[in-house]
Structure formats: structure tokens, C-alpha cells
Image (cartoon, grey):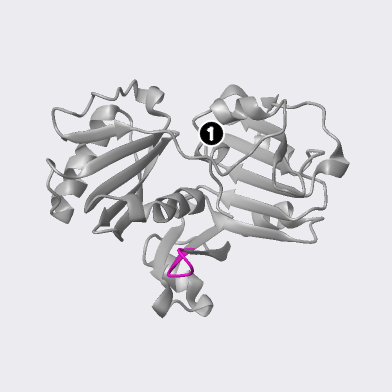
Amino acid sequence: MKKLYCDKYDSKMVSYLSLFLYDDIRILLGKDINRKVVAVHTWNLLASAEKPISQVWKDELYKLDVPTNVFVHNQYFSLVPGVVFNPDFLDTYLAFSSDLPVDLKTYYTGLDSNNVQLVGGMDTKLFQLLSDGKSYVSFHHGASSFLSYCLNEKSKLLPQEILVYLFDKSFYIAAFDKQSLVLFNKFNVQSKEDLLKYLFGITNQLGFDRKHCRFTLFGKHGLFEIKSNWALDYFKNFKIEQIHFNQSYHPGTESFANTNHFESHWEIN
């Protein structure tokens, strides 16, 4: 099922596109020359018997030949320190984190002034379909925006911090020790009890003190009816937070900013 947050827009105003591919939803943002959102199209996979990814590359907005960023939320990713990174070994980096299919297209994104490289991969056929008709298209792992936000905020962090972005019964987690990133990963959960078990386990693994570590949750906390006081019996400093904005909107599209998708507030730039 396709949803338009702005069904009328001037294609001449669209200078950039950003496409976000989640398991359950596809999000396409059209932006003007100043990267201000002028159109939003979404496809909900759970509400449709169709295969919405085939609708994306046929969409009149996506077919515009303007610079396009594609963000792929999947299991193929690996973090590599910038000092040892070599773009000739992308397949090797990904093989450390999971078994790879034969037909995989790899790419990478520099974060934190290239101190960290986030390597990702996707099906080669899908890569080609999304690239067709594009003079310039860039691919990134979907975690790029969340991780860039965490690294952008690191100067404000306490000595022990754990940040979580919850979405589609999955979550990304980034842990910082004295403002240095010490862990980043993605896990699947079916309940808030599952989430709690992961938080306990990761806290113990890192040797963090539950009385002093700060836990911050972003995203779809309503999915599991998580309230701000839910974890206070276990963690003394737990909060549900809204992401700061680096996205801006034209009138008619701003309702998308009320969603809990991370990219409705923040996109790596």
C-alpha cells in the first residue's frame, strides 16, 4: 500500500532523492536544491499483498534522474576502523559478520570524519534495478544515519552510554565508553522482555554499571508499549528521546516528521 504525504509537487523542484529500504516499509523522500523535503512516498509491506520494491523503481518520483542516496536496512554490515580500512576488501569485512550470498554488491560509508567505515551489501539484481536510469546513485547501509547521529552526539555523552533505535521488531544498538564507540550491532526482538534481556547482556558484557550507564531509546517504542518508566527498576538512567532535526520540510510534507522513523528527523549528510 502506497501512501503520499504530499500528492502534489513540482518535479522541477526535486534536486535530490533519498530512499530507505526497511523490511516492513519503503520510504522515498524528494528534496529541493537546499535538501528540504518537498515530497514523501511510502510503501507499507505489511498492508499490501504486492511487492512494493517493484513499485519503487517504477514510481514517478524515483524515476527522476537526480542524485539519489539509497539506504538498505539488512543483515549485511560491518564496522571497520578507518586506520585499517581498505576498499579492496569489502567482501572480506562483511564475511566476518555473516555468511554472504554469492551475488552481493558491496559499498561503504565513511563516518566520524572517516574514522569509522560502515560496510554494507545488497542483492546485485536489486542494486542494478535501483541504479537504472540514474546518472548518480550512492548506496549505504541503513544504519548510517543512526550511527552518524550517535557519533555526532558523542561529545555530550556520559562516560557510559547505550543508545538504541527500535524499528520493525529489530533494533540497532551503539555503546560508548568515555565517548568512544565500543559496540555496534543489530538484533531482532519479539517483545520488550527480549529487549530487556539484550540490554542486560550487553551491559554485563561491556562491564558497564547499571546504576551509572545512561540508556536512551529512539524510534518505535509504542510497538511494545514501552513507557519512560518501564526499565527504571533495572536501569537507573533510562529515557525515551526524540531525535534532533537535521531534516526540514516544505508545507504539506511536515506530517512525516511526526512518525518514529529515524530518517524523518535525521539523515546522514
Boundaries of the magenta span: 112-118
Looking at the image, residue 132 lies above or below residue 236: below
Residue visible at 82% across and 32% down in the picture: 9
Residue 226: percent from the left, percent from the top?
31, 24
Pick the front one: 226 or 46: 226
Is 223 placed left or right of 176 in the picture? right
At numbered mark 1, what does the secondary structure look like: helix, strand or loop? loop
Residue visible at 45% across and 76% down in the picture: 85
* Magenta highlight on residue 204: no
**According to the image, label 1 marks what residue?**
24
Pick the front one: 183 or 93: 183
Residue 74: percent from the left, percent from the top?
49, 49
> Mark 1, residues whose alpha carbon is within 10 Å: few (<14), some, or many (≥20)?
some
Across the whole image, how many numbered discs are drawn on residues? 1
Residue visible at 40% across and 56% down in the picture: 151
Looking at the image, residue 41 lies above or below residue 115: above
Q: Amino acid at mark 1?
A: Asp
Which of the 4 image quarters holds residue 124? bottom right
Which of the 4 image quarters holds residue 241? top left
Residue visible at 50% across and 71% down in the picture: 90
Is 81 placed left or right of 144 in the picture? left
Placement of the C terminus among the 4 image quadrants: bottom right
Placement of the N terminus among the 4 image quadrants: top right
Residue 172: percent from the left, percent from the top?
38, 45
From where the camera sits, is residue 262 visible?
A: yes
Residue 210: percent from the left, percent from the top?
13, 42
Is 54 placed left or right of 60 in the picture? left
From where the camera sits, is residue 123 visible?
A: no
Pick the front one: 175 or 54: 175
